Amino acid sequence: SLFKMESPWEMFKAILKGYKEQAVEKNQPFGFVFEFFEMEILKQEERQEMSTEQEDVDKEEAILNTQMTLSDESMRKKRKGAKNLRFDVMLKKKEGFEKKAEY
């Protein structure tokens, strides 16, 4: 849209980039403070990227764990003859099995 609001973070990055371009055009040093902020921005973006990747991995693992739990539970129930258990009931059963396994 035309009136897209930028986050303060994006605005700060744009301002910093503008200052750097002006310094390069005038053959002036960029300055320690600006270099510091530039490095901090890079570090923050790397941390953000890593946390996003970790979230994706965690989601994939959660999906796989749920699928494995459902298949294990359904196999047990098939042997016992129970059919069509709801998902939340299956998870409660799984928690019960895990508690028993701890003892």
Image: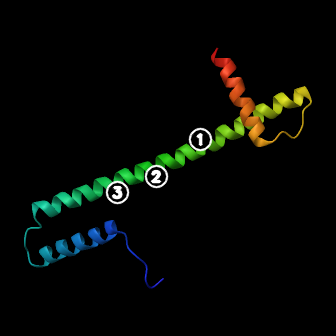
Q: Which of marks 2 and 3 is nearer the N terminus?
A: 3
Q: In which quarter of the image is the C terminus?
A: top right
> From this viewpoint, which residue is outermost toward the left?
28
Return the residue at label 3: 45
The numbered disc on residue 103 is none
Q: Is residue 7 above or below residue 70?
A: below
102 with respect to 96 (left or right): left
The residues bearing labels 1 and 3 have C-alpha atoms spaced at a distance of 24 Å
Q: Residues within 10 Å of mark 1 (few under 14, many from 20)?
A: few
Residue 11 position within the rendered picture, expressed as x and y whole percent measured from the top left = 30, 72
Residue wearing tag 2: 52
Q: Judging from the image, what secondary structure is the residue with disc 3 in?
A: helix
Q: Disc 2 on helix, strand or loop?
A: helix
Q: Which of 36 and 102 is in front in this view?
A: 102
In this view, the residue farthest toward the bottom is 2
Mark 1: which amino acid?
Glu
Q: In the image, what residue occupies the spot 15% across and 77% down?
A: 22
Q: Residue 61 carries which label?
A: 1
Left/right of residue 3 with respect to residue 91 in the rendered view = left
Q: In this view, does 27 lie above or below 47?
A: below
Image-quadrant location for residue 33: bottom left
Mark 2, residues whose alpha carbon is within 10 Å: few (<14), some, or many (≥20)?
few
Which residue is painted at 66% across and 22% down in the image? 99
Q: Is mark 1 on a helix, strand or loop?
A: helix
Dot 2 amino acid type: Thr
Identify the residue at image location x=67%, y=18%.
101
Task: Name the amino acid, label 3.
Answer: Glu
Dots 2, 3 in contact, CB < 8 A = no
**Location of residue 15 with respect to 47 vertically, above or below:** below
Label 1–label 3 contact, CB within 8 A: no
The residue depicted at 13 percent of the width and 78 percent of the height is 25
Question: Residues under labels 1 and 2: Cα distance?
Answer: 14 Å
